[in-house]
Amino acid sequence: MMQAIDPNLLLLGWLIRSTLEMSTPLVLAALGGMFSEKSGIVNIGLEGMMLMGAFTAAAVSWYTGNPWLGLLGGIASGGLLAVVHAVACVTFKGNQIVSGTGVILFASGFTTVMLKVVWNAQGASDPVTKIPDVYINPIKDVPILGTAFGQMSPIVYLMFVMVALSYYVLYRTPFGLRVRASGEDPSTLDTAGVNVDHVRFVAVVISGCLAGFGGSYLSISFLGFFGKLMTGGQGFIALAALIFGNWTPIGCLLAGVFFGFLNGFQNTIQILNVPELQLYLNFVKMLPYVLVVVALAGIRKSIPPKAVGTAYEKEAKA
Amino acid sequence: MTADESSAEVEVPLTTKPLSSLDLLNAKLYTWSFWKPVMWAVISIVLSLIVSAVIMLLSGYDPLLAYRTLFYGMIIQPDYALYFATPLILTGLSVALAFKCGLFNIGAEGQVYMGSMAAAIVGYAVALPIVIHPLTCLAIGAIAGGLWGFVPGLLKAYRGAHEVVTTMMLSYTAILFTQWLATYPLREPGQVQLTPQLPAILPSAAIPNVVGNYLHWGIALAIVSVFVVAFILNRTVLGYEMRAVGFNRDAAEYAGIDPRRNMALALGLSGALAGLAGAGEILGNYGRFIDHWSPGIGFDGITVAVLGRNHPWGTLLAAIFFGALRSGGTFMNAVAHVPIEMVGVIQGLIVLFVAAPRVNDWLAKSGFGYAIWVKNEPKIAVPNLAALVFGVISSVLALGYCTMKGLGGMFIGLYFLVAIVGAVSFGMTLSKYRRAPFIHVVLCMLWLLTGAVDSLYLGGVSFRTAAVMSIAGFMIAVALFWVRSKMIKEGRCQP
Amino acid sequence: MSSTNKSMTAIVVVVIVILAGAGAYWVIMNPPVLPENPYDVAIVFATGGLGDKSFNDGCNKGAHDAVVAFNMNYTYAEPTAISEYEGYIRGYAAHAQYSTAYKLIISVGFDQETALKAVAKDYPNQHFAIVDMFIDPTNYTNVASLLFNENEGSALVGAMAGLVTTRDKIGFVGGMDIPLINKFAGGYIWGANRSNVNVNFTIAYTGDWVNTAAGKSLADGMYAAGFDIIFAAAGRSGLGVIDSAKSTNGTKAYPVWAIGVDSPQMDLGINAANNLTVVLTSMLKRVDIAIYRQFESVFLGTWTGGLKFGTVGNGLVGYEVNPTWVHLDDSVYTYLFSLENEIGTGAVTVPDTKYWIH
């Protein structure tokens, strides 16, 4: 029975699954970046916050044996690191990009040192308890659908919920309005009696929580351990997805899924074992980066929030 | 930050007689605007060392031993420190130069790779006489890196593409592209190593060592580059225009300066410096292009430029400092077995502290504030300060116990609670919240509780500490409440 | 210029000078204690560092065993970049912090070649050993090169895969498309074809030694496409393959397996519920024994430089067996035993390239 199915068809199903799996951390972190940038604070520290989330999630899951607590820990630690970023560039009006760089450096060093402290390992931690996958048994044996959706991490579904939730929060709540206003026109918001710094601070912390969420997915759901620097630049790709998706939740989702697809696509090429194509895989890997540059170069107009990157200074009271 | 930068520039009085550079330097040395950033940098370093020490304590390393070996390692091998500093000077200059024009070249790493690849190709594939060969390689490397920086420069200038994103993306592209070159078309024939690499450069292309075993003549190149960049920025029309664009783009445009041309040029020059760094390392150190050879010198360039306040000379000093930190770090790792990543933590913290210069202002202000408080009202201030210190010590101690191996989950939870309450108590006392004494009492109770739980269930791992902490805490609490009642009587505090 | 500014500057300068002076004084007056060298051997690990569950850990285990057996001591350094190698090796060779030299300095990993050669030339009396790299023994008499015929071990695990596969489809996940890794691939496919002529295969590379997510993703895809055994020779990325086998196993009508590399990795795939592992076997490169023998020769005073090959014949290359974690038919072990003998005695030669591509 199984023999009858063309393996390439099976791979197609897997490609769908892989696309969703690989895009989940990207979309989550990109959503995080969106909250921060919509409020006017550039957050290039996403990479560091993801890494921190991945590490803490694995550590908590390892200590307690409960991956859901690990997930909470990962989200909280991402948020905590975002507090540092927020204090530096919202409260103290520091340079946002410099602070983001500091966050990345700190997180890379800190998680590597702590990897050694917690597991006495430098490369990868011991296996930790994973968040159990969700099985949809009725479709298990359906050819493509079964491979695609038969077994999936619950966080992948949560990711879609987060996209919807972000959309709702950003466009249907007063808080979302304030976030967008503080990124577009902070002085008007200030005149309306809203504390711009307060809004930005909260937005940056949300951003860190989402990035930590994405990182946790990597360490306790997709994989079952923490590896040194395991995010491997995904925070930067998330930033690219954010820009490619034009700073909107739906855009982040589409861009993230597209980048996830590129990843799954190059893996598929490899598994199909076409040596001629294998020679040029690096170019497929380059695609997300090149596409963002091309997009920014003006094939498509991208509209960042107007006040992004600048600290808001109140007019002098005197 | 750019506004800070430019306002920190020295006002040069307009005189008919040209001032010598020595006069200028002399004048500069007596200005607060010169010393303030230096002090910021020093304070940031000290603060980050303190925070790192806390992290080391929590992770079970001895910070005193670590710092002793670190500093010893920093000063006993100056040539080794300079060896690490050489590429950092150039990448730091690269980032600083772009920053002067208001641009953030976060993708120096990619320019480093393009430069090193170009230099490595010329180094092995072209036969040239000695001296001319390395110079040609360096020039080609600088051009390759420069082009890789010029593209985002053009995109920024004429299409408005944000350079932070484009340089970063092109950096990844460059790393993947050079990896491809090293894996397939240009791979060394018969190579058996685990990492793809190019054939070794010809001996005529190698940059010789200055002294000892590490330091190559690239250091001279780097120092000359500092002179050149300082000259370009301060003494040429181009540099003046770039700084004007960086200070205020609209005003510069109004004054007849073409901001587009300057931006593109600035990123191009910045890329050339990064490419030079890569080329120098290949010719002087690695001897061939190896996939993923760079230990992040492009990224470290940002930290160097940040600590050096984007001044060429500051960048030089910062690069030497980070180089020394790295050489000291290897010594620390070899002797004290503290992971060398600790140096990365220190670097990251320095950057975070430097990123927000107002932290130092705030610290200084509140520090002075407390000093004045203690002087004016010692009876009120001293108990409060004691509570402040108590909160911090509680937090750190409790976190330390949290990380102890082999304790039960409940115990860890209890100590985590103590740590959090300690932090809250610290925060409340610091902000002089009127209910802070109550939190302080809760903290003391928690210490008592942990002591009791410990002696009953765990055989007194931390019993003595908990007892001492709770006794000290309650003594402070008595003083706090005494002060509080007095203040309420005087009507200075709400009950 | 106001006088307050001037006095402020003066104060700042004085404070900085005093602080710096005090610091320097403290550091110079309190140099770390420099006793007689308490260590016999120093190890400079590869950039992966300890805890890679593979190569470096294997070396560390060998050193550990030797410490117990011979009452010797060793110290180590974990560089994070190629540019740090020479500093460490030279630091140990110069033994600046101790009065006596190390009896042996071991460099782990091929990429220490350049650094080691430079130092070995400057310290002709210091003994060195390098793992996984060929260093010309006529020019460098003070260096021992510890090399392994990984293709022979890969052939054995390949043969096992050929016998165990239920779908006649096996996969290989390598770190990079380079000769060293293709040596593993060549041996693996050769062995599988020898034990099972019907076997089909696919080969993929993670492009990175540390990208665990890529390893997992590739393995997921291979399992989805019906390949049921995957040999991972991709450093830390290989851990992702084992992880994938863990989460895929049980979702299919047939069992899926991963094969570990370098160190015993069967324990990484253990399912706590039934105490069985999804790691069929591991291709063992007994760096631990090689390192142990280096320590031993130092202890006995019989150390010599030159090339030391680890082969199936001398037991330094092999495969992991654990009947409690994996239940296999005895015929599998019988077949492997005879193949091991043939390879060990040199009756057959295992290819060391992707021999099917010309």
Image (cartoon, coloured by chain):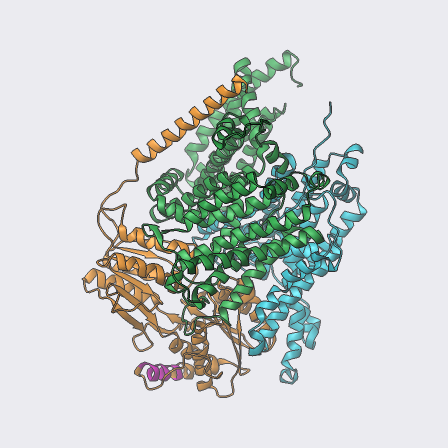
Chain colours: A cyan, B green, C orange
Magenta-drawn stretch contains C228: no
Write down the quadrant of residue B7 in the picture: top right
Q: Where is residue A178 in the image (x, y as percent from the top left)?
A: 77, 41
Q: Is the magenta stretch mostly helix, strand or loop?
A: helix
Q: Is residue A143 left or right of residue C112?
A: right
Write down the quadrant of residue C68 in the picture: bottom left
> Considering the image in quadrants, where does the C terminus of chain B appear?
top right
Residue at 42%, 43% in the rendered image: B325
Q: Is residue C263 left or right of residue B44?
A: left
Residue closer to the observer: B430 or B173: B173
Write down the quadrant of residue C225 in the picture: bottom right
**Residue stretch in magenta:** C335-344
Q: Position of residue C170 (x, y in %)?
A: 52, 79
Question: In this orientation, does residue C51 appear?
Answer: no
Question: In this orientation, does residue A224 appear?
Answer: yes
Residue at 43%, 53% in the rendered image: A120
Marker count (numbered):
0
Can you name the residue that lies furthest to the top here? B490
> Considering the image in quadrants, where does the N terminus of chain B appear?
top right
Residue at 52%, 23% in the rendered image: B385
Q: In this view, does C91 lie to the left or right of B286?
A: left
Can you name the residue that lies furthest to the bottom here? C197
Residue closer to the observer: B207 or B77: B207
Q: Where is residue B487 in the image (x, y as percent from the top left)?
A: 61, 14
Residue closer to the observer: B405 or B241: B241
